[in-house]
Amino acid sequence: MNKNLLLTLIGLSLGVVSACKTVSAIDETGKVNITGSLVDEQQRSLKNANLVINGQSFKTDTNGDYSVWVSADDIYALTFSTEDYYTGIQTFSHYELEQQDMNIQPVELVKKVNGRTLFAFGGDVMMGRRFAKPKFDNAVIIEADSKQQDTKSIVEHMRPYMSLADMAAVNLETQIAHTKPNERAPKSVTFYSPPETLTALEWAGIDFVTLGNNHTYDYMDSGLKSTLKYLEKSTLNYAGAGINKEQALKAHRQNINGTDFAFLGYVGWEGGFTPNQTASDDKGGAAFGSMQNIVDSVSRESADNHATIVQYHGSLEYKTEPTLVTEQRLKTSIDSGADMAIAHHPHVTQGFEIYNDKLIAYSMGNFIFDQYFYSTPHSFVLYVWMDGEKLHRAEIVPVYLKGYKPTPATGMHRYTVLKRLDQLSQKRGIKLGISGGHAVITPNKLPVTANSDITIKAKDDQTVYPLYHTQWQQSIAHVSSTDKKLTYRLGVNLVNGSDFESFDTFDSNERGWNIDQNAFDITLDSASSGKKSVKAELKSRQIETFGMTNFRRVYNPSSPMTISTNIKVDSDTKVNFYWQGRKSRDKFSYAIKSAKKHLIETVTLDGTEGWTNLEVAFNTQRVGYRSFRILLDIEDLSGNKNTVYLDDVNLVEWQSAYSKLNSLPVVNDGNKQASFIGFNTTPKSDVKIDLK
């Protein structure tokens, strides 16, 4: 990476006593005091190191600590640098730091040594389809007359992160063409993206793309040749596809920091159409990742003394675990001499494993993609430090795709990303460590997780409480209360950005709520938690619908659910809670406009309650539906102007049945990714939760 560019990017990069801590950390001058420490991997202090926060420069003290005053902002981007260490970037929201007294856990920097290489991996990338033609009346992201500027704006928040690496790589899951190619493969979904996509990736610090995926041959030979032509004109290296089998299975070879590396890319299936998506002796396409092709091509690179990195596109979409075919092929690649295996395709993240001392990432999820499903925006960038062909360390930078744009995940999004990865990786023998707001994997070293506890303050009529303010790497060990009749269960939130604190950060709005299509807007006037909520001014007898823009595609049928929200109104108001489903055979366009709304419950308020917690229970359908969403019809009954506020609109899917206090629940799907705790009745006294 160009040193001058890196320095430029660094300059640009910008609680828990109860479940509802909202004490302000801003002083009378509008500044906040952010504290923390900087250490190396052995936990030794890094003194007099450089720290930049939102453009302001500071130094750590002789103990490696910092206590600095900066102007209050929604987002704080911190860049740490010191001689002989890799630069580190961490990003936090004001709201999440407020929950931890504006203190950041120790940040670790990795030492530079001869022969050490830093890789950065991102997941699936495309900039076509809904980037230019969005759904739900959302704003266009890539305009026809400003493609170069607009494509760069998509990657601007990841540019500082990717540019730190000696080599950064993503999965280019699209063909590249100026206009739509004439030929089209006989399949339901095909992608092409403008050539400016490659320019934006270069600008963002990406060095390599893998083409071994199921969209490399979407527009057959014409699209493949166009893609290869534009790649040859760019500075991006690639592997995983070609005009014939030999070229498709050819590795990209490159010497980095004195080590010869080889990069291979594969797709895991040939495709059920003719001509299929994989290359053959006389036909172009993606490299087919059959067992034999993997063994032959990896063995070839290993025999030539190349440290070999495999990227593989396989498994099933939206699943928490890889298929056994994928797992076996990745492990066989390592048995054949590969030194790392990176996989993708499910569009959601999966866990990590260290197999024969080599790192496997089973699914990277999305990096730049236009999917509006609520399960797909949570992702990550994977840093991997290699000492030659030996794994030294990996670091997970949580990412959230806001309005299809990758941004640093903060607050509830950070928790969601890292909690899932930690729990899925533990099933494969890896417990993630922590560095500031990131997770780390250190071979042959178990992280130390401190025990702590929180107290949930009992509130009238509230049985459902969020756990986002707890540390993602800790698990519930014990729940206790003097209320002996109390039982509890654990659940996950199926909607994103439900606290609205990060709705409009990073120059990109959250697209999961229908705020763009109704009378509600983000406001600072009043909030039940944090400082933001949504607000609408209702006219006499007006009905306004607030809810999910689209359907939740990934969910468990026949599961107990709770809609939990806080509302404040001026005068008499009726709230109808509905669920609406897309049946298995319904077209999306029909379902979103015409599917039946099923009434769950009606609540009336008279305006004297102030902020009021509402909890509405229902069960997801057992069969017949592929997805569903929730909607709230809010009606003025007063005949006068009525101001309505909504905050913390959560859709909780319960993962366990009720369990007695002092015992741990059996979680339904084997993953303990809880972001909410619920009780069978309103607690009569405070509840203590021990974490370990």
Image (cartoon, grey):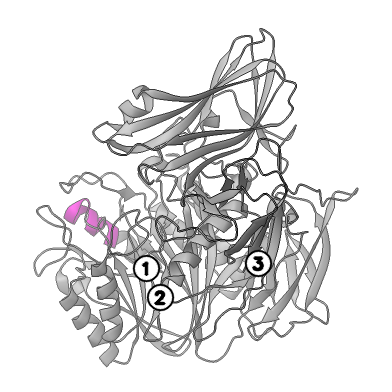
Provide residue 651's location: percent of width, then percent of height.
51, 40
Instruction: Work out whether mark 1 precedes mark 2 in sequence or the reverse, and give the earlier one.
Output: 2
Residue 669 visible here: yes
* SS assignment for the magenta stretch, majority: helix
Q: Quadrant of the C terminus?
A: bottom right
Between 224 and 308, the residue placed more toward the observer is 308
- Tell me where the magenta segment starts and ends, as one range: 218-228
User: SS at mark 1?
Assistant: loop
Q: Nearer the viewer, residue 570 or 531?
A: 570
- The numbered mark at residue 353 is 2
Few, some or many residues within 10 Å of mark 1 (<14, 14–19, 20+): many
Say above or below: 385 vs 27.
Answer: below
Confirm or deny contact between disc 2 and disc 3 (CB under 8 A): no
Q: Which amino acid does label 2 sit on?
A: Glu
Q: Mark 1 points at which residue?
A: 362
Separation of residues labelled 1 and 2 (CA atoms): 8 Å
Q: How far apart are marks 2 and 3 (CA)?
A: 32 Å
Tell me if mark 3 has few (under 14), some (14-19) or many (20+) residues whose alpha carbon lies within 10 angstroms of its own. Answer: many
Residue 652 location (% of width, % of height): 51, 43
Q: In this view, does 447 lie to the left or right of 597?
A: right
Answer with mark 3 or mark 1, whichever residue precedes in sequence. Answer: 3
Helix, strand or loop status at disc 2: strand
* Marks 3 and 1, how far apart at CA: 31 Å
Residue appearing at x 76%, y 47% in the figure: 22
Mark sitting on residue 10: 3
Q: Which amino acid does label 1 sit on?
A: Tyr
The residue at the point 52 percent across, 68 percent down is 396
Indicate which disc, 2 or 3, sits on the residue closer to the N terminus. 3
Verify whether residue 223 appears in magenta.
yes
Residue 355 drawn above or below residue 188: below
